[in-house]
Image (cartoon, rainbow, N blue to C red):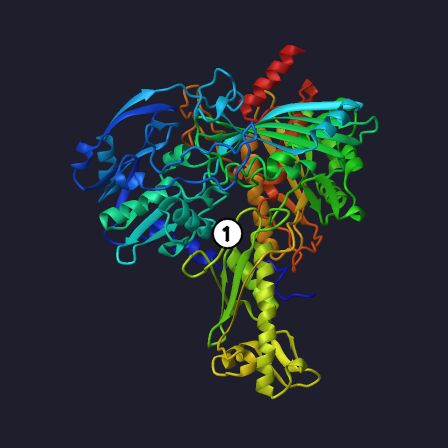
């Protein structure tokens, strides 16, 4: 089908107001007389709270309220609940610690909230917080993922011996062990996926108010899924009907998975508003963000690949310890377990097994971050393939090629969680290698060596699930409503926090209904305006949103045919719709859809159900999840004297299905790649043995900058999926999913003259330099 707007690189409609400072973020909406709240946090990695005295703080100027975990209003609250359940080692349901808004009795990580001060100004609240007298009894802490389950490690919860929260198995362990035992080659690699944090441009922020007449709460907050947060607040925290909780997510300055949950600070603004009778604002400062935001990744894995003498993959085994923090975030158990299907990669591996052990530690909870298990899975398979090629004498590209799933094998059941519906994986790889001039790399390496530099190149094939879960995707809502002027308002249950949904969905609706882009207004983010929504995460929005929009549009067209038939005094079966016009088939009698919409407000006919207006709302799910895929090729140069790694060339060939807006897809890929490279080269959350955060500011937590990156070369291979009407597959996380493996493979290739076969992330200049020094000394 030919579209007028779908496939065009149209600019985002919101950018003009955002770059002019006219965005409406949560902190821009503060009404007159709002209080500020400051949260007092634990300075200890683990400590018992012997006593808290707030008397002096309560008497200080401007202070309106001081809350601790023992306040009656706080003890009446429920706890933040995990949405995913797993099994403990003995097969029983995993223990879920009480994740309270304010901690009582013990604090379990540096930054754990223990008290909140509400005052007229933030400075007054901070001054009063310093006057709160807390007697602490420090306890032993454990933060190291590899040590958390040791017999002598500090125990967080007696209900979870040795800090083991859950054990999760996927695949046939016995078949994998047998295949590995008979394999000609068995290659293993152990590595960390280090802990990082989202570092969104807009920190977490919340504005709470309370209506005593309606006994209802309103929360303005930067969120990716306001409806899910409303559900958590209503069902888990306040235990009231959802119609007494309104959640509004205005402009949001980045989400990346961090802004999917109801955090303690959000609840505090609502409780404070109820008790003081005034709106309450909380704005997380950057230092607070490092302490109190959910963190991400933090796994330690061992991956083993079995191959026959020709290099055919026989079996893959991955054993992972996943750090979930002191408490379980709402999606904390999802990340290390729900996207394991990606371990199959784009390859034919007959037997795969993965075991994940989740452990508690004295750190903030871990939660989804761009990719949410997908980059970790791709890293596992792509890293061990490169190592297998090195140790067994195979060419890394040809080893991959030998095992790729072919297009004529689709749909392909990996026999490990996922069944791929479509994809041309070899084409992706060939295109990426050509664009990267893979064949010319040897000459470039020689030139670098003359200049005293080490040059390396890495490749990684990536695949991910989007719009899941795989067996039964979550539904999404979409409403198309024409007003009396013919204007169209589209209400989506998804949310945009940088993706450009306003123009994307306008393009889709304009093409579905034969409208102009300017006819369509897109709105989202208010639970009182949009009744149902699942939200934006997991590269799902365009897939699920366009699916529901297609259904709504088709229903409108059918209804429009009836209205047009009455207008023409014809039979509705004779009415056809094309390019925004209803017409009697075979004649020149026609009427535009906007005119039909106007008629719908004045025309009443029994055949139309006696209703007025022209709108349709759909809550639906696509047929199945989709599987975006692609190939990344990365080239680096390393100075052996300093360990500094320079990024020279990055090529990405992606299959995200139909590309609705190429400009926005490239932007998503660029951003995803940068976040993946950031983790590999720079970003790292570190704690000392007492649980103290060592990387609590940008002085210690290094972030990637534009100057670190070359121009990206991006190409789209559009292989349409049959799982939704537009054939889209999702693009939001594709860049990150492939970046981790491609970059580390390139770095290891550069270091190969020293006999180095692996380096852990983050591959900072210091770590690269020390690795070179150690290898030199060993030789």
Nearer-the-camera pick, 119 or 98: 98
Report the quarter where the N terminus lies.
bottom right
Point out residue 64 in the picture as x, y percentages from the top left corner. Answer: 20, 43
Query: In the image, 59: left or right of 613?
Result: left
Q: 10 Å neighbourhood of mark 1: few (<14), some, or many (≥20)? A: many
In this rendering, the answer to whether 513 lies above or below 422 is: below
User: Of helix, strand and loop, which one carries label 1?
Assistant: loop
Residue at image position (26%, 58%) is 213
Q: Pinpoint residue 116: horizontal percent, then vertical percent.
A: 28, 37
In-front residue for pair 396/224: 224
Residue picked out by circle 1: 535
Rendered view: 690 above or below 648: above
Most foreground residue, 208 or 591:
208
In the rendered view of the protein, which quadrant contains the C terminus? top right
Q: Is residue 582 above or below residue 27?
A: below
Quarter of the image where one finds residue 38:
top left
Residue 297 percent location from the top left of the image: 53, 33
Q: Is residue 23 visible?
A: no
Q: Provide residue 666's location: percent of width, then percent of height.
A: 60, 49
Corner quadrant of residue 648: top right
């Amino acid at each position: 089908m030919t579209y007028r707007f779908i496939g065009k690189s149209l600019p985002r409609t919101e950018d003009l107001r955002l770059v002019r400072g006219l965005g409406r973020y949560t902190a821009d909406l503060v009404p007159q007389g709002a209080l500020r709240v400051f949260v007092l946090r634990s300075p200890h990695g683990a400590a018992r709270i012997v006593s808290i005295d707030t008397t002096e703080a309560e008497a200080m100027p401007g202070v309106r309220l001081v809350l601790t975990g023992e306040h009656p209003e706080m003890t009446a609250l429920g706890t933040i609940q995990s949405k995913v359940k797993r099994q403990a080692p003995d097969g029983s349901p995993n223990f879920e610690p009480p994740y309270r808004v304010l901690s009582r009795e013990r604090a379990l990580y540096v930054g754990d909230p223990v008290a909140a001060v509400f005052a007229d100004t933030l400075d007054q609240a901070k001054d009063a917080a310093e006057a709160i007298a807390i007697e602490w009894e420090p306890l032993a802490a454990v933060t190291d993922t590899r040590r958390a389950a040791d017999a002598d490690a500090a125990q967080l919860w007696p209900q979870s011996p040795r800090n083991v929260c859950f054990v999760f198995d996927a695949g046939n362990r016995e078949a994998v062990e047998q295949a590995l035992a008979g394999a000609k080659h068995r290659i293993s690699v152990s590595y960390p996926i280090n802990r990082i944090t989202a570092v969104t441009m807009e920190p977490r922020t919340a504005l709470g108010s309370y209506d005593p007449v309606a006994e209802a709460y309103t929360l303005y907050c930067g969120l990716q899924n306001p409806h899910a947060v409303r559900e958590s607040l209503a069902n888990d925290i306040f235990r009231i009907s959802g119609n007494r909780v309104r959640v509004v997510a205005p402009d949001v300055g980045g989400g990346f998975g961090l802004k999917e949950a109801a955090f303690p600070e959000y609840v505090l603004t609502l409780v404070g508003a109820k008790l003081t009778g005034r709106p309450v604002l909380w704005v997380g400062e950057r230092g607070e963000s490092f302490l109190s935001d959910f963190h991400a990744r933090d796994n330690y894995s061992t991956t083993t690949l079995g191959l026959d003498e020709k290099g055919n993959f026989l079996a893959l085994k991955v054993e992972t310890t996943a750090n979930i923090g002191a408490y379980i975030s709402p999606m904390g158990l999802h990340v290390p377990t729900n996207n394991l299907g990606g371990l199959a990669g784009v390859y034919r591996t007959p037997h795969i097994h993965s075991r994940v052990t989740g452990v508690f530690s004295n750190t903030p909870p871990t939660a989804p971050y761009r990719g949410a298990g997908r980059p970790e899975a791709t890293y596992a398979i792509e890293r061990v393939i490169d190592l297998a090629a090195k140790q067994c004498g195979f060419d890394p590209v040809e080893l991959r090629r030998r095992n790729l799933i072919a297009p004529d094998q689709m749909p392909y059941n990996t026999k490990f969680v996922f069944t791929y519906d479509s994809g041309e994986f070899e084409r992706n790889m060939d295109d990426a290698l050509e664009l990267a001039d893979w064949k010319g790399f040897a000459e470039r390496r020689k030139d670098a060596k003359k200049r005293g530099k080490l040059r390396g190149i890495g490749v990684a094939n990536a695949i991910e699930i989007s719009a899941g879960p795989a067996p039964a995707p979550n539904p999404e809502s979409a409403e198309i409503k024409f007003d009396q002027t013919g204007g169209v308002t589209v209400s989506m249950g998804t949310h945009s926090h940088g993706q450009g949904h306003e123009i994307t969905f306008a393009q889709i609706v304009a093409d579905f209904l034969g409208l102009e882009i300017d006819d369509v207004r897109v709105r989202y983010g208010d639970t009182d305006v949009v009744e149902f929504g699942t939200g934006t995460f997991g590269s799902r929005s365009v897939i699920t949103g366009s699916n529901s929009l297609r259904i709504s549009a088709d229903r409108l067209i059918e209804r429009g045919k009836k209205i047009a038939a009455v207008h023409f005094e014809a039979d509705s079966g004779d009415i056809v719709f094309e390019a925004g016009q209803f017409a009697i088939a075979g004649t020149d009698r026609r009427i535009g859809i906007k005119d039909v919409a106007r008629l719908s407000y004045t025309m009443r006919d029994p055949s139309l159900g006696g209703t007025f207006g022209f709108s349709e709302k759909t809550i639906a799910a696509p047929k199945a999840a989709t599987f975006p895929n692609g190939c990344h090729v990365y080239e680096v140069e390393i100075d052996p004297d300093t360990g500094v790694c320079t990024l020279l060339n990055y090529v990405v060939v992606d299959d995200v299905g139909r590309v609705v807006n190429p400009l926005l897809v490239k932007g998503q890929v660029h951003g995803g790649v940068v976040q993946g490279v950031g983790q590999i080269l720079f970003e790292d959350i570190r704690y000392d043995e007492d649980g103290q955060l060592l990387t609590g500011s940008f002085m210690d937590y290094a972030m990637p900058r534009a100057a670190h990156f070359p121009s990206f070369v991006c190409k789209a291979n559009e292989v349409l999926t049959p799982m939704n009407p537009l054939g889209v597959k999702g693009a939001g996380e594709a860049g990150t999913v492939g970046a981790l493996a491609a970059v580390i493979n390139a770095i290891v290739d550069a270091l190969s003259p020293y006999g180095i076969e692996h380096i852990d992330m983050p591959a900072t200049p210091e770590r690269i330099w020390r690795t070179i020094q150690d290898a030199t000394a060993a030789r």
